[in-house]
Amino acid sequence: MTTLAGMEHLLADWLPSQRWFAGKDWPVSAVRVLAHTPIGSEHRVEHLVVAVDQHAPAGPTTTVYQVPVEVRPDRRDRIEHVHLGRVEAGFVYDALHDREVTGRLLERLDAGDDLGGLTFHRVEGAQVPVGVESLVLGGEQSNTSLAFGDRALLKVFRRLVPGTNPDIEVHAALARTDCPHVAPLLGWFDGTWADPGDGHPVHGSLGMLQTFLVTATDGWRLALTSVADLFAERDLHAEEVGGDFAGEAYRLGRATATVHAAMREVLPTAVWDTAQVRSTAERMHVRLDDAVHEVPAASSLAPALHAAFDELAALPGGVPVQRVHGDLHLGQVLRTSVNWKLIDFEGEPERPVDERVMLDTPVRDVAGMLRSIDYAALHTLLSEHPDDAQLAYRAGEWAQRNRGAFLDGYASVAGSAPGSHEVLLRAYETDKAVYELVYEARNRPAWTVIPLTALERLAS
Amino acid sequence: MVTHHRLPPPGSDPLWFQRAVFYEVLVRSFADSNSDGVGDLRGLIGRLDYLEWLGVDCLWLPPFFASPLRDGGYDVASYTDILPEFGTVEDFSLLLEKAHERGIRVIIDMVMNHTSDQHPWFQASRNDPDGPYGDFYVWADTDDRYPQARIIFVDTEVSNWTFDPVRRQYFWHRFFGHQPDLNFDNPAVHEAMLDALRFWLDLGVDGFRLDAVPYLYERDGTTCENLPETHAFLRSVRRMVDTEYPDRVLLCEANQWPEDVVEYFGDPAEGGDECHMAFHFPVMPRIFMAVRRESRYPISEILERTPTIPSGCQWGIFLRNHDELTLEMVTDEERDYMWAEYAFDPRMKANIGIRRRLAPLLENDRNQIELFTALLLSLPGSPVLYYGDEIGMGDNIWLGDRDGVRTPMQWTPDRNAGFSQADPGRLTLPVVMDAVYGYTVTNVEAQSRLTSSLLHWTRRMLQVRRENPAFGLGAFVDVGGSNPSVLSFVRHFGDDVVLCVNNLSRFPQPVELDLRRWEGWRPTEMTGGVPFPRIGELPYLLTVGNHGFYWFQLEPAEETS
């Protein structure tokens, strides 16, 4: 590592300014290289896995990051915005912004190379668009995504955890089905690094390559377009305005049910017995208690909401469970020219991986989408017309119509509406709204009205 | 003159139809030369200067053959005679000559599936079962054969069989009971039909719109639609045209979903060996749906699902025509997108299903009329304009079903809109007189004088289209973009690259487009010639006004250091 001497210091300065860096305000005490693998290119490219030790308010914390860097003998204008600084061996750049380097990554994915600490895999039969130039896409929170022309999307995970990323796992499994509602997986890469605590080698996912959905926009945006159209017509009902979303919501319900069915086909399933259902209900009770403690405004609703969880606990068991999306909302679905696609099967990113891959009822995803439809209806209302009772009424109609259309679409594939499992759906939706209540109270107090309104409805 | 941009003269370019703009003109309603209140061929000849000025490439004339007119002329009583009120065969020859002089081609409707029951062939067939025409139609002793064939006009017909009291047998008809189907299992019918086609080809017509082609044959155990025998007959028609009359076009009217219609182009390995063109029916309702939904997906989805067609073929697309489809006819499968949308939106169904002209359908909103027209002129396929839509003519819903959109062309603010010198009471149909679309306000003369008029705008758009082969011949690339209300696509043919950006929303919209494929190129807006910023690596940002659109020419920038 002699030629990389000084790299840790550069990274300690540079990493906190990156969008995907967690805890930007916490002082960095050390950056340690956990693994380094030369990728090989015209210039020196090192694939680095580093540990960042920080002083968080709750005590010391360590996060592991993936940082491929390029060490060049000269400076380069084109990627000057990702220049980290200088080490003995040359000028250091974030290698993901250099098209030559990313092209090399693509070649390795295509070839399925094994570089020791770094292993590339291509899905059998997949067409990797070798030779197409990449562009770093903006707007990513915890990853860096590269678009290779309009052919493929490479998602490079920045924050690393040991184990197989659930998104890769699910997509690789779904590749064995003909499910048309996901972006086909083309390949992925993983690697080995030293555990930042005990130094033992651990293995984990580093990135995945998927077909790029060039004509896509996300469902959130589509839904907001519909709501904007509704609000421009104060006297018309949701089903009367041109920008009606119900057709799309119906198709989205069908797509969701189709993906669930495909996941059942290729991933584990089980049936919950009475005890498992009870313990699920128990966790919901606890979360509700915690939420009421934090947001007393909800306390009057608590008894009725607890009753919903009691009903869940009283179910006789026999509840089918499976792998689910885990964090399904309108921002996790893309409308392409062909159909709806579900993306990001990572589950809630804040939860540990083993929790994220736990089997659950598909009602969890359905409840998530219903809550998201509610949010779409109220988002514009709260941000632009907070005191408009007429529009609030219209927004409510919009949400009801599109929730219904989504459930109808789901039922048209799954055979029965998840709504027919009323107890399950009510409990899961309540649990989700309870989570939102805490989140909004902590981050956007003015928005607690959204989950509160939902909880009032669910309590009645 | 604008002739230097016109298509090559008739006779020199077999693929002319791939770049042509068609104009559907009803002879009856366009111009009356003899003051009898009915439009005629000589009247049309008198208006060719206007059509040349407008810049259309090919006229499509719906039926003008001798007919009892119980189905708008689609009930043909003679394949080689013209309805006397329209003129004579000599008049038609003159029309061809005068149109060709101006570089305008002419195609005509040809109904092969059936004739009127007044046709001499049918009269001979019913009166003399053993005579030469006895086997020209499909006769049977019972009315129970081919039970799987659906009844197309369910509102007026109860069966595809009707009893003929003269011959005392049932005859087969897929449309009205007064339109017996010809028997294509009889080789003599083939010869008679080919001779009818030759008659008009010899006069110089540039092609035919073949009406109702899926129904030519009947076979037990089938729906009697799209049968292999029908395709075989179309191939024989095509062979005749190719050998005897190269560069004439066959435009097929098969009222079906594109993946089924594509069969009527024939063998892709041959570049297509049946019809040169076919209508792409679903595009029209999808455009209306997309603008209503303020979402590009209704359009981009149907284009994504449109199969590739053979190299020597072309789609025909339209916004309106003389005989509006009902939705039931384009959508019969439950997977169908429109069905699902319409089930949720009964208003939409009512609006599209009935026969309205473009302007009233769009509440005379100039922005929307321009957007719809721009889409028609830029989406894949040869556009078919409907007479009068270039000036935003209205309709007369009180005239009932079909006639509401067939009112006389409005030429001037004078009596009868300049259509005819007859007494107003004698007119074939009354001219539109309402306050918004009436001929005193909406007419060619007034709009010719105003360069800001819809007429001048349409003419300019046709000019721009004519100068860019990409519109007719180019590949279609949906470029997506960040905004679901903005439909953006590139048409490219050789070095002609055109970017079209359409705001389907009634509100102004921003859109970011991924145009990296053309990085370093410069867009120039095509109607005004204004250069826009060069395309870089980052998403290309545009803002588009409500229902606005842009057409950009993309050109590689000259090398800079």
Image (cartoon, coloured by chain):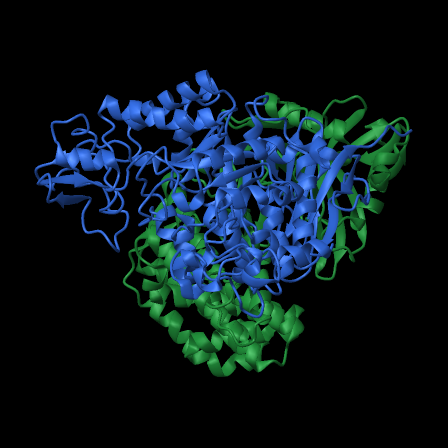
Q: Quadrant of the N terminus of chain A?
A: top right
Q: Quadrant of the C terminus of chain A?
A: bottom left
Q: Of A45 and A194, which appears nearest the observer?
A: A45
Q: Of B218 and B111, which appears nearest the observer?
A: B111
Residue A426: x and y in percent read 40, 68
Q: What shade has chain A been given?
A: green
User: How many callouts does the rendering have?
Assistant: 0
Residue A365: x and y in percent read 45, 56
Q: Is residue B310 left or right of residue B260?
A: right
- Residue B247 in view here: yes
Q: Is residue B158 left or right of residue A350?
A: left
Residue A214: x and y in percent read 60, 40
Q: What residue lies at 13% left-to-right and 38% top-to-bottom?
A: B145
Q: Residue furthest bottom?
A: A300
Q: Of B353 and B197, which appears nearest the observer?
A: B197
Q: Does residue B298 lie above or below B438 as drawn?
A: above
Q: What shade has chain B been given?
A: blue
Q: Quadrant of residue A87?
A: top right
Q: Of B343 and B91, which appears nearest the observer?
A: B91
